[in-house]
Image (spheres, grey):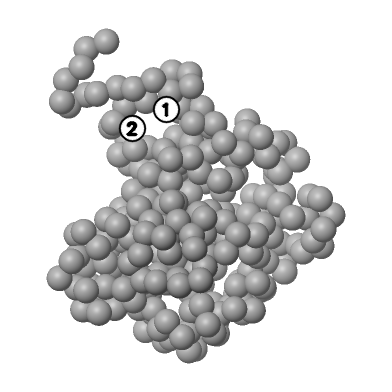
């Protein structure tokens, strides 16, 4: 194998993944953002708050006692930590405060239950939400009787209230995703899970939010390495998967 500074390759579980893989994946899977959605990060005001919200994918093992802004322990080890680190590095002069308030296992209605403390009280100027996989996943074991209609209605109600309370907030809606061929995701997920993805995109359109197409991104990623390289169980990303998600998040808002 030839090694040089411009094309360093490393072995994955099967096949080979290059350092250029993530830019290639994102170029192929992310459409060009509308002009009004470009440059959101650079348009933030000095001292603004950015908030990441969601379930375990966002939570990523963060501590939930202090829940400090810009704190590694309060961010866990996932895409939110990587995204926030990149933002703080590039926009140091803006003195941004970035929080992670994702909680493992959450569905949309559980976000709503804690929205005053974990959103409104923080007064974010930019709010990113990744939610939906549990709204479907937890129906498979019979412990939750939610439907995609409930997911969509709950999400719309939450976003409507959010825009009422924070009329100037900039919204990011992340697409829930699932990767086949991993330990938790099988054929039983599809096509039913697709309707939750469609509902999330619909919410982004209704509320003029930036939409990050994580399903398309992970589908494209599997052309470079198998699903288990990006996520062990098909839902929770690996180190590589978190890096991919963070790069996508940053690209969508720059």
Q: CA distance from mark 1 to mark 2?
A: 7 Å
Which of these two is toward me, 93 or 17? 93
Residue at 49% from the left image edge and 88% from the top image edge: 164
The residue identified by callout 1 is 224
At horizontal 57% and vertical 36% (from top left) the residue drawn is 232
Q: Which residue is mark 2?
A: 21
Q: Nearer the viewer, residue 44 or 89?
A: 89
Residue placed at 60% from the left, 40% from the top? Answer: 234
- Where is residue 166? Give x, y as percent: 43, 86
Image quadrant where one finds the N terminus: top left
Q: Quadrant of residue 147?
A: bottom right
Disc 1 element? loop
In the rendered structure, the answer to whether residue 180 lies left or right of residue 139 reads left
Q: Are marks 1 and 2 in contact (CB under 8 Å)?
A: yes
Q: Residue 73 placed where, x, y %? A: 41, 60
Q: In what element is the residue under mark 2?
A: helix
In the rendered image, residue 248, in percent from the top left (x then y), is placed at 37, 50
Q: Tell how many labels.
A: 2
Q: Earlier in the sequence, mark 1 or mark 2?
A: 2
The residue sitting at the bottom extreme is: 165
């Amino acid at each position: 194998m030839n090694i040089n500074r411009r094309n360093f390759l490393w072995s994955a579980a099967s096949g080979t993944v290059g350092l250029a893989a993530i830019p290639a994946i994102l170029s192929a899977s992310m459409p060009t953002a509308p002009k009004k959605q470009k440059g959101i990060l650079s348009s933030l005001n000095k001292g603004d708050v950015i908030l990441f919200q969601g379930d375990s994918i966002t939570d990523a093992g963060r501590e939930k006692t202090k829940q400090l802004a810009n704190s590694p322990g309060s961010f866990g080890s996932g895409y939110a930590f990587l995204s926030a680190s990149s933002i703080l590095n590039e926009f140091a002069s803006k003195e941004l405060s970035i929080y992670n308030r994702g909680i493992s296992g959450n569905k949309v209605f559980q976000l709503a239950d804690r929205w005053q403390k974990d959103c409104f009280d923080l007064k974010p100027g930019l709010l990113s939400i990744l939610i939906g996989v549990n709204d479907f996943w937890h129906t498979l074991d019979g412990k939750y009787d939610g439907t995609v209609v409930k997911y969509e209605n709950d999400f719309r109600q939450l976003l409507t209230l959010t825009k009422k309370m924070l009329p100037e907030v900039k919204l990011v809606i992340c697409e829930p995703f699932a990767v086949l061929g991993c330990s938790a995701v099988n054929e039983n997920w599809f096509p039913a899970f697709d309707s939750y993805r469609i509902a999330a995109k619909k919410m982004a359109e209704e509320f003029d939010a930036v939409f990050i197409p994580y399903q398309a991104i992970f589908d494209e990623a599997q052309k470079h390495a198998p699903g288990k390289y990006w996520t062990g169980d098909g839902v929770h990303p690996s180190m590589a998967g978190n890096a991919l998600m963070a790069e996508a998040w940053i690209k969508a808002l720059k």
